[in-house]
Image (cartoon, grey):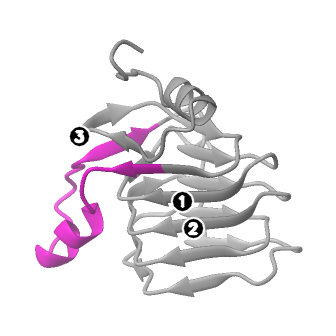
Amino acid sequence: GVYGLFWQGDDAVDACSSADIMPIIFEPGTYGPFDIDQDDVTVQGKQSPVHNRLVTSAYNNGLRGAVISSTTDDAIDVTAAADDVLIKWLTLDTRSTGQAYSAIEIASGADNVHIIENASHHSDEYFAYVQNDYTVLKGNYSASSDQANIIFMAGADYCIVEGHHDVSS
């Protein structure tokens, strides 16, 4: 990217991780899906979409802030190579035509992943598909997941969910 501006999440995560520049801040706008496959990564939007959603009593189908959107993949994949990851203040959208994509998928082998104050409006599978140890989900807001909102697979030990707002009907 020029002057630290990137159009692809993967490019921003790779470049900032290599240069040891954290946090990676996504400006308001819509971005494609990306993978986090490095240790010690923080990705975040500029402000919490959850606070904005809860203050305004209705979700109103609007996607605001930094939106990670995909119809062909999970919005964010945290791979087995990644430890100590923080994802916060993003709006995640994986609506598609019947495909099964989650807002966030965390692979077995990734440890210490914190998902804090994110919002998901549409997810064709789960808000969070967790296969790893030591995941913390705190203060997230999720609506319209086609499956269970959060699923912990066998081997996902020592995980914490606090203040998750599930408004799926």
Q: Residues within 10 Å of mark 2 (few under 14, many from 20)?
A: some
Residue 78: % across, % down: 67, 49
Marks 1 & 2, CB-CB < 8 Å contact: yes
Q: Residue 28 got which mark?
A: 3
Label 1 – label 2 distance at C-alpha: 5 Å
Q: Residue 113 got which mark?
A: none
Q: What is the three-letter code of the residue carrying label 3?
A: Pro
Residue at image position (33%, 17%) is 3
Label 2: state its secondary structure: strand
Residue at image position (56%, 25%) is 15
Please identify the quadrant where the C terminus is shown: bottom left
Label 3 – label 2 distance at C-alpha: 21 Å
Label 1: state its secondary structure: strand
Q: Residue 86 got which mark?
A: 1
Is 53 drawn above or below residue 62 in the view shown?
below
Q: What is the three-letter code of the residue carrying label 2?
A: His
Specify start and end residues of the magenta stretch as a single range.
43-69
Task: Find out whether residue 163 is within the magenta segment.
Answer: no
